[in-house]
Amino acid sequence: MIPQETIVALATPSGAGAIAIIRLSGKNAITIAAEIFQSVSGKDITKQKTHTIHLGHIVDNGKVYDQVLLSIFKGPNSYTGENVIEISCHGSTFIQQQIIQLLLRRGAKMAQAGEFTLRAFLNGKLDLSQAEAVADLIASDNEASHQIAMQQMRGGFSNEIAKLREELLNFASLIELELDFAEEDVEFADRTQFHELLERIEFVLKRLIDSFAVGNVIKNGIPVAIVGEPNVGKSTLLNALLNEERAIVSDIAGTTRDTIEDELIINGIGFRFIDTAGIRETQDHVESIGIQKTFEKIEQAQVVMFLVDSTELTMESLERLKVEVEKIKNKYPQKALLTIFNKKDKLEKRLLQNLESQIENSIFISAKQKVGIEELKNELMSFVNTGALRNNETIVTNTRHYDSLLKALEEIQKVKWGLDSRISSDLMAIDIRSALYFFGEITGEVTNDELLGNIFANFCIGK
């Protein structure tokens, strides 16, 4: 049911600034705004055309609160599909609150989180996946996540799903029609064409499901744990990567007693670096807690950078290092492991060449001198499959979409098995309807209040 109330909210971030925008949406948005707005040219804004801007003052009982610009967007040609007013006022928090209070006293109500976008969805201006992309676009903090959100908001993902759903729906109608003529034993749906469609749908669904691995990385960043023994240069490496003094650096072993995290964007991909406490035997209670946290962060990371002080290596310690690297590989087989030899600048060339051949997937740097840092960044990028992004393919980033795609694929595979096994049309129709249901969950043809509540609760108020 489409809400009838007129809602109001601050559309810009809270706090003082140069300007602020207050947004109204609803059937009575223009008439409510007209009660407190006086145009400098004496125009009646209830009689003005859509998509026009007017200079005037916010006035109540003869008191002038501010000089503002008022924009008019008449439904259905607006973001929400309703009448929308946007008031651009000066950014004083006092002015913002006074204008909102005036509008509330004249019949508007405060908007809930995401309610403007919810109304856009309910009024058919956006489908559900596009509406969710609005939140992703606002939250995007790197080029890759911005690119995916824009593609989804323009309907790239939902158009692909809607087209497949429509084709499946056509066959479903023919299968359902066969049930009305069960006694005549006729087939209206061409089984060969239907099988080809199911093959195509299965292929697309698998591609979209596989893309989630990349999409999740792009949306949430790649957690990278920097581990190693105390005083090998982990904090220095973090500072070199971030190009700032983020972590305390000291010659005293055990300085880092908690994990330190920060993010770096490399070629549009976010990497969340975690500087951990050095791994060693210790009697210090506080340091031992930090070491325990180190192992927890390794569990959470997708990439582990094992840092080694190359100047301290002997033949005996090198063998121990090989054993440690194998332990990490065996314990975390799904994680990318990069062995980094620090203090390259202090190594003789002969020793450097000897070490390079000893351990697979290793790199030599000098964190203090910032030597090899760019090479290290390139190595990190090699762990990210950005081919789909470069080719502008549809990439799934939303966990809800991923879950619905998995369920839709399961139902499609049931239909395919039923078709190959020549089961009756009534049984096959059940699985087809289930697949259509999960397709509809993604784009919003199938929804409920609880689902909408969960989605839009994550939006900011004013959007």
Image (spheres, rainbow, N blue to C red):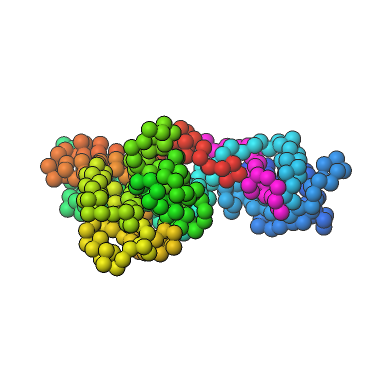
**Residue at 52%, 56% in the rendered image:** 244
Residue 283 at x, y percent in the picture: 38, 33
Magenta stretch in the rendered image: 1-25
Residue at far right of view = 62
Residue 97 at x, y percent in the picture: 73, 40
**Residue at 77%, 56% in the rendered image:** 55
Residue in the foreground of this view, choosing between 358 and 436? 358
Residue in the foreground of this view, choosing between 401 and 260? 260
Can the viewer see residue 86 in this picture?
A: yes
**Residue at 26%, 58% in the rendered image:** 361
Residue 175 at x, y percent in the picture: 23, 43
For residue 429, above or below residue 373: above
For residue 230, above or below residue 369: above
Answer left or right for 63 relative to 300: right
How many marks the image carries: the answer is 0
Residue in the foreground of this view, choosing between 297 and 151? 297
Residue at far left of view = 421
Residue in the foreground of this view, choosing between 78 and 363? 363
Q: Is residue 20 magenta?
A: yes
Q: Is residue 412 magenta?
A: no
Answer left or right for 104 relative to 121: right
Specify the quadrant that holds the C terminus: top right
Residue 126 at x, y percent in the picture: 49, 49
Can the viewer see residue 174 in this picture?
A: no
**Residue at 64%, 53% in the rendered image:** 73
